[in-house]
Image: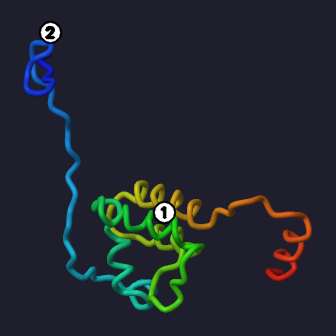
Amino acid sequence: MLVQAAGRMLPGHTEKRRHAVPKTTACRARVACSCRFAREAPLHHDALVRVDADVSAALDLFELATTWEELDYSGEPLVAPADWLAFAAEPRGHAPELPERLFSVAVDVALRRGAPATTTRLLRVLAESG
């Protein structure tokens, strides 16, 4: 095998090795879909549909997940992290494994809490939700 370092071959290597580069898409056309997410947040829906095929869309998802608790997104029509797993479960005509994995990790990131809840705080949160 021939390996290059700074334009020259390293000793003991006889052939070039190529790394497979994953193909991604950068299509921004509207996605035809009748799910509730397409009606509630059409642009965000279309971006989320592309997370398994577009590295940029996946990165946008994780940037949103990382900042969800820190920034105010209430004025923007977005699919909230609490709905991402339901979104990923919507039939889209292709294998669902990758989108489910991406959204599952993104939900974990978006909904994580910094410090463990104290007993008092945990009881208050449970009382408010129940």
Q: Residue at x 36, y 57 (%)?
A: 95
- The residue located at (51%, 84%) in the rendering is 73
Q: Quadrant of residue 94?
A: bottom left
| Marks 1, 2: nearer the viewer | 2
- Residue type indicated by callout 2: Pro
| Residue in the image at 41% along x and 87% along y | 41
Three-letter amino acid code of the residue under disc 1: Phe
- 119 lies above or below 9: below
Given residues 17 and 118, the one toward you in this image is 118
Left/right placement of residue 79 relative to residue 17 reads right
Residue 23 appears at what percent x and percent y? Answer: 20, 52
Instruction: Tell me the number on the disc at residue 103.
Output: 1
| Count of picture labels | 2
Query: In the rendering, at what x and y percent does residue 2 appear?
Result: 11, 18
- Give the image quarter of residue 5: top left
Q: Quadrant of the N terminus?
A: top left
Q: Seen from this angle, which residue lies furthest top? A: 12
Label disc, if present, on residue 28 of the rendered structure: none
- Label 1 neighbour load within 10 Å: few <14, some 14-19, many 20+: many
Task: Identify the residue at the far front of this view.
Answer: 6
Of pointers 1 and 2, the one earlier in the residue sequence: 2
80 is higher (above) or lower (below) than 119: below
Q: Which residue is mark 2?
A: 11
> Residue 12's x, y, as percent?
16, 7
Look at 44% across and 88% down and name the residue there. Answer: 77
State the residue in front, 102 or 97.
102
Residue 37, image x, y percentages: 44, 84
Quadrant of the frame with the C terminus: bottom right
Q: Secondary structure at mark 2?
A: loop
Callout 1: helix, strand or loop?
Answer: helix
Residue sitting nearer the eye, 72 or 30: 72
